[in-house]
Amino acid sequence: MGIVKIDDDLHEEARRASTVMCRSINAQAEFWMKIGMMAEANPTLSFNDIVKMQLATAHVRVAEVAFA
């Protein structure tokens, strides 16, 4: 584990986002880094595709919503 220096404004954005997403600031930053790394490695995938793949990898069953 290491220390990462980030801009104060970015830290504030992570703090705000972490509140909305019910994560710690560190967990929010880690989530953004992980998704960003995966997006760079898979530029044709959308954010939703990446999250869906991660949920499937973790064997999380997500109910599909049917719209009428």
Image: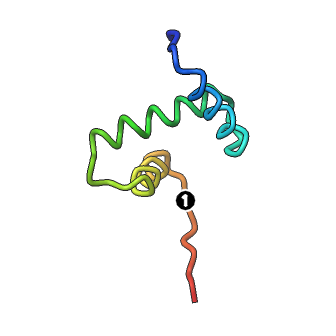
Q: Please name whichever residue, 50 or 62, is drawn nearer the observer in this view of the structure.
A: 50
> In this picture, is 19 found above or below 6?
below
Three-letter code for the amino acid on which mark 1 is drawn: Arg
Which residue is rendered at x = 57% and y = 84% of the image?
A: 67
- Residue where numbered disc 1 is placed: 61
> In this picture, is 7 found above or below 58?
above
> In this picture, is 55 found above or below 2?
below
Q: Please name whichever residue, 60 or 44, is drawn nearer the observer in this view of the structure.
A: 44
- Coloring scheme used: rainbow
In the rendering, at what x and y percent does residue 19 appear?
Answer: 73, 39
Which residue is rendered at x = 57% and y = 75% of the image?
A: 65
Instruction: Kindly indicate the quadrant of the structure image that contains residue 64.
Output: bottom right
Q: Report the quarter where the C terminus lies.
A: bottom right
In the picture, measured across the screen, residue 42 lies left or right of residue 54, that is: left
Q: Please name whichever residue, 9 or 68, is drawn nearer the observer in this view of the structure.
A: 9
In the picture, measured across the screen, residue 33 lies left or right of residue 18, that is: left
Which residue is rendered at x = 40% and y = 38% of the image?
A: 36
In the rendering, at what x and y percent does residue 27 appear?
Answer: 60, 30
| View extreme (top): residue | 2
Which residue is rendered at x = 57% and y = 68% of the image?
A: 63
